[in-house]
Amino acid sequence: MARRSPTAAPSDLTHVDASGRLRMVDVGDKPVTTREAAARGAITVSAAVRRLVRSGQVRKGNPLEAARLAGIMAAKRTSEIIPLCHPIALTHVDVEIASTRTGYRITATARTRAQTGVEMEALTAVSAAALTIYDMLKAADREMVISDICVVEKKGGRSGHYRRSRSSAAG
């Protein structure tokens, strides 16, 4: 199975036509297959904020549960915020948030049976979850950093199975 180069030349970009105009890719002739993608990211927060979250003392409520729900909701609306993204029916979205030594690692998995992949939905879920944590904790820590958002695995479709090497994956 042929794999695309990780750095495609401009002429290889599927969302750009021959005259350089942006376009939505026609996936009408592609077969419907089961597709799954996982993305990951991180948010660094202070030790004091981690203690605040652990003790349940955040005045706005549980930021990790709010973030998990925000990630799921965002994945379902990805095509509304990413201009050329196809709307797809998701069959499953899972968002997990794990405590780390410096903050939280967010992992999202999205699944569908469709003619196009679900990487954007997984990435959107991670991004929205991280932004929700930031929003709920910003009064206590203005120096939080959201980082390392990336696709860590993709299955299904013409490009087959992709797994990011461990050394380059977030978290």
Image (spheres, rainbow, N blue to C red):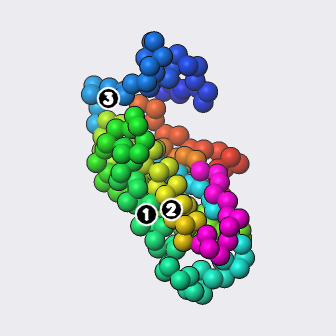
Q: Residue at x 46, y 48 (%)?
A: 37
Amino acid found under the numbered disc labelled 3: Val
Q: Are marks 2 and 1 in contact (CB under 8 Å)?
A: yes
Front label number (3 vs 2): 2
Of the residues under marks 3 and 2, which one precedes in the sequence? 3
Asked if labels 1 and 3 touch by Cβ distance under 8 angstroms, the answer is no
Amino acid at the residue labelled 1: Ala
- At mark 3, the secondary structure is loop
Going by the numbered disc 2, the residue's amino acid type is Ala
Badge 2 or badge 1: first in the primary sequence? 1
Farthest residue, direction top: 19
Which of the pair 131/37 is nearer the observer?
A: 131
The magenta region covers 137-149
Direction from residue 45 to residue 8 in the image, left or right? left
Q: Is residue 41 above or below residue 59?
A: above
* Label 2 crowd bin: few (<14), some (14–19), many (20+), radius 10 Å: many
Query: What is the x, y in percent for residue 168?
Result: 68, 46
Residue closest to the eye, 101 or 74: 74
The reply, left or right, for residue 160 in relation to residue 41 is: left
Q: What label does residue 70 carry, if any?
A: 1
| Residue 148 image point, x, y percent | 64, 51
Q: Examine the rendering and report whether any part of residue 125 can be seen.
A: yes
Residue 27 is tagged as: 3
